[in-house]
Image (cartoon, coloured by chain):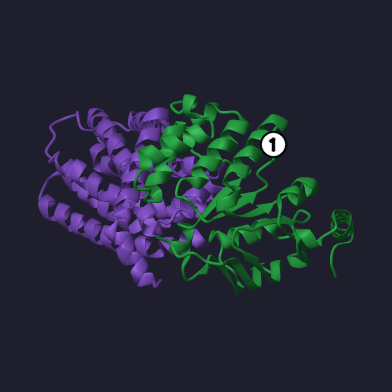
Chain colours: A purple, B green
Amino acid sequence: MSAAAVQQRRAGRGLSWRQFKAILRKDIVMELRTKEMVTSMGIYAMLTLVIYQVALSQSGAAFDPRRIAAGLLWLAFVFTSMLGLNRSFVHEKDQGCLEALLLSPVDRPVIFLAKAIGNLLFLLIVEIIMIPFFSFLFLQQGSYQGEFWMIPLSLLGGSIGIAGVGTMLATMSVNTKGKDFVLAVLFIPLMYPLLLACVSATTAGVLGGDGHIQQFWTGMAAIGAYDAIMIAAAWALYEFILGA
Amino acid sequence: MPEVCDTALEVRDLTRTFGVRKALDRVSFDLPRGAFLSIFGPNGAGKTTMVKVLTTLTSPSSGTAKVCGLDVVQDAVELRERIGLISHNPLLYPDLSAEENLLFFAEMYGVDDSADRVRELLVSVELDHRRLDLVRTFSRGMLQRLSIARALLHRPDVLFLDEPYSGLDPHAMDIFDSLIAQIREDHTFVMISHDLDKGLELCSHALILARGRVVLAAERAAVDSEQFKHTYRATVGLGVA
């Protein structure tokens, strides 16, 4: 049977869609049961924001922490997401489950998509915890002149890229000895352009001021372009990465 | 319906290298449908690498391998629908129940009657009374029985057994044997074993690997057990030039 015929038969059975739903449902059920990823990420994110707030508490009245608040938010979020992404494949390594998954007749990009969307959901839950806490710590002093809706929107755009690229990199690093270190070394340089755009867009939302609308949408356009290019690349490379 | 094949395995000059080390070195052999092949060899002989290549988990560096007439590289996705693997690792999610695990893998294989099939298999491996319990609470023997159910979900033609008796107590081994005996007629088996007596007792074909090469490949009926053991021990002790 030719590869095209196999694809046609599988498409007729809707197999890829069933597999996608099965992997996503399994990840959600396991997370609801163990609460390993969301709990650890949520607590870590809040602790990091508290440390930043304490570190800036003695900077004096002349210094407005809001000028760097967007950067601090993204610092906390990037470190938090690395913690979660590392854990996202730990379940798969337990008792050889990744091997069992790879033994099934699933197209590898389906695994990527399901894992990436699962990771995105968990990151979004952490953001729901983080944003009010960030607002309480950094946006309460003085009069707030920014536009708050820009903050969650820029976080959403950045999270899509982090989930996509992070899932690919977590897959690469899961079989390495120092997987935490390997993920960080690969993740930060690849995230650099996304981080620049995200910090710019979030800063527009935190500070407001002249030209903040343009700054926000320029940042969001860069985030969108990064997400599209990197997720397409991760999708295309995933089979190779799993086979390496 | 999957096509029926007379030859379960066709392996030709199969080589797999890791850096400069050859885990498999021009391995060639055939196995007819319905046979039970036991593969023996010392640690590092290339047994697990061979099973990984035959189950599409690793690509060969050169040579070809076909399982049920399907090439392990060209036809990998379709081939995965025709094979099952039972390993010393259970390959099950510890934080899912027995039923959830089987339903998950049934979806991954596109099993149409998944709920009925899962129920039927849980009964046949005598775990239906534990179907809602998390797999992490299972004993080694129970994990291995559930692992059989997972491997049989999609009604594969060829079953690969990678040291399946590892860590099982005698009672669990008896249960495992009886389950294998129940499905013996309908499947081709490829088993890696360090236990010469058990491997020879079960097999219709035997193969000794050492340093990635085939030292001996023969039908069980044509092999004298003592001579075979002698050859194996000589291989383990001396290696192969």
Q: Is residue A50 visible?
A: yes
Please name whichever residue, A165 or B10, is drawn nearer the observer in this view of the structure: B10
Q: In the displayed structure, does residue A9 sit left or right of residue A64? A: right
Crowd around label 1: few <14 · some 14–19 · many ≥20 (10 Å) = few
Q: Is residue B233 above or below residue A67?
A: below
Classify mark 1: helix, strand or loop. loop
Chain letter for the residue marked with disc 1 in the picture: B
Q: In the displayed structure, does residue B29 sit left or right of residue A191? A: right
Residue B18 x %, y %: 65, 65
**Quadrant in the picture for residue B219:** bottom right
Q: Is residue B231 above or below residue A35?
A: below
Q: Is residue A198 above or below residue A66?
A: below
Please name whichever residue, A5 or A45, is drawn nearer the observer in this view of the structure: A5
Residue A4 x %, y %: 34, 71
The mark total stands at: 1
Q: Residue at x 56, y 28 (%)?
A: B138
Name the quarter where the N terminus of chain A is drawn. bottom left
Q: In the displayed structure, does residue B204 sit left or right of residue B188? A: right
Identify the amino acid type marked 1: Gly
Residue B122 x %, y %: 48, 34
Q: Is residue B18 visible?
A: no
Residue A73 x %, y %: 30, 40
Q: Which residue is mark 1?
A: B167
Please name whichever residue, B81 or B57, is drawn nearer the observer in this view of the structure: B81
Q: In the displayed structure, does residue A20 sit left or right of residue B220? A: left
Q: Residue at x 33, y 29 (%)?
A: A57
